[in-house]
Amino acid sequence: MITKPTLAVFASDKGPGTAERASIMSQAGTFFAKKGARILCLAEQGIIPVPLITSARAAGGEVIIVADEEFALPPALSGIPLVRIADAEERLLKVAELANIFVGLPGSLASASNLYRAWVRAGGGASGKPVVLYNRNQAFEVLRGYAADVLSHSVSHHERIVQFADSIDDVWNRVNRLLSEVAK
């Protein structure tokens, strides 16, 4: 088992449902930090999951940001390690390299798309790097259908690689279980 896992967390507070998403990110950041996880975030085109990062830091957690060249770190986030990479493809590869596991929180289509793109750069189902999606309010129901209809036919043991959770506790339990399986 990895003692301090790095969770690449994909979330966004842009668009409908912003207040609820901010609350979910805050809860997740606090919970993951208290469990000893390192949180890795992607910052592109000025979009960054601020509630996730601030709550993780307030709980004593470690956060790393991989960002584009134009990203300006808000003063409230000073002191966070920031890896600047100009090329979008290289940013995704860096996230894929640093992450032990991918976590998707309800957010925008852009955050779900970035999660998928980073996971593919990590080798997708063949990478051994699993994905846990917090399916609050059926945010990832379309992806659940995709996993059942497409991944099940193309990725052996897809159910061990892509999982859906119903609470932040459930996300963490699945992260631990999946990382234990990967370590075997």
Image (cartoon, rainbow, N blue to C red):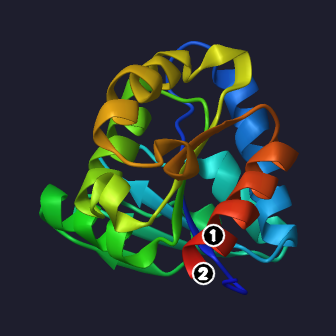
Q: Are marks 2 and 1 in contact (CB under 8 Å)?
A: yes
Residue at image location 51% in from the left, 72% down from the top: 100
Give the labeled residue for mark 2. Answer: 184
158 over 55 or under it: above or below: above
**Residue 42 visible in the snapshot:** yes
Q: Amino acid at mark 2?
A: Lys
Q: Which mark is residue 17?
A: none
| Numbered disc total | 2
Give the labeled residue for mark 1. Answer: 181
Mark 2: give few (<14), some (14-19) or many (20+) Cα within 10 Å: few
Mark 1: give few (<14), some (14-19) or many (20+) Cα within 10 Å: some
Separation of disc 2 and disc 1 at Cα?
A: 5 Å
* Residue 112 place in picture, x, y as percent: 42, 34
Q: Secondary structure at mark 1?
A: helix
Q: Amino acid at mark 1?
A: Glu
Residue at image location 24% in from the left, 67% down from the top: 93
Q: Quadrant of residue 177?
A: bottom right
**Residue 46 visible in the snapshot:** no
